[in-house]
Amino acid sequence: MIREFGFPEFMLLIDGAKWTVLLSLVAFAGGSAGGLVIALCRVSASAWLRWPSQAFIRVVQGTPLLMQLFLIFFGLGTFVEIDPWLAAALGLGLNASAFLGEIWRGSIQAIPNGQTEAAHALGLNYLDRMRFVILPQARRMAYAPTVGFAVQVVKSTSLAAIIGFTEVTRAGQIVNNATFKPFLVFGIVAVIYFFMCWPLTLLSDHLERRAAIPNRSPK
């Protein structure tokens, strides 16, 4: 039975938006942890660390995110029970780790070699060089593209609807099936996505402008 779009339907969309935000935060946090490990492996002097991390990035970036979610939800689901929430968080987190790893790898390698040579001269080992010399400088360059990628993470959560996770897109499908008002329902969903992504876009632009301003030496 078709019913009218009202306040309960609108609140269902808002509830879905809450799960979208939560899934985005979990995926980005997991992707950040994995991305840092991958970035450090990519710039390591050990080929045993570089090659597996590079292979992981190529596989993840070379396959659709939707297929990755299918492999985790349906593939792993044949061996262990896995719910849509865990599958979505794991799939989006692994996907984000590959992209963030490349973003941060580029930021690390953008640091002049003289900085590494100076750290060598001070007798710093690999971890100390990264912690005290390289990463603090690379972080400034990585802010803008990292925040920009966060926008992609938010939008990518919509694919979790395919495996049954009820975020804002899936909530929109449920409401539309009940009200049969696709233009209204998915228009509201689009507006919700816009207000979630727009502040991140503005922040990314701001950080990009700040990174373009050279540091002034103290007088």
Image (spheres, helix red, strand yellow):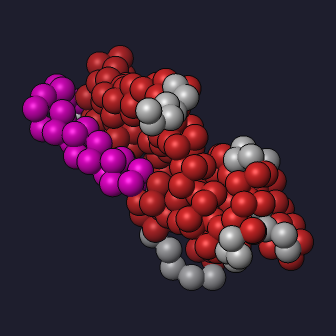
Q: Is residue 14 above or below residue 44?
A: above
Is residue 8 within the magenta segment? Answer: yes
17 or 60, which is in the foreground? 60
16 or 154, which is in the foreground? 154
Tag count: 0
Q: Residue drawn at (84%, 69%), measured in percent from left and top?
A: 45
110 or 8, which is in the foreground? 110
Q: Position of residue 99 (x, y in %)?
A: 65, 49
Q: Position of residue 71 (x, y in %)?
A: 67, 63
166 with respect to 15 (left or right): right
Q: Is residue 127 above or below residue 17?
A: below
Q: Which residues are magenta?
A: 2-25
Is residue 121 within the magenta segment? Answer: no
Q: Position of residue 163 (x, y in %)?
A: 51, 55
Is residue 152 in sight in this rendering?
no
Q: Position of residue 157 (x, y in %)?
A: 47, 46
212 with respect to 111 (left or right): left
Q: Main secondary structure of the magenta part?
A: helix
In the orientation shown, which residue stands out farthest toward the left? 7
Q: Residue drawn at (12%, 28%), measured in percent from left and top?
A: 6
* Picture quarter with the C terminus: top left
Is residue 123 in sight in this rendering?
yes
Q: Residue drawn at (63%, 82%), measured in percent from left and top?
A: 79
* Picture quarter with the N terminus: top left
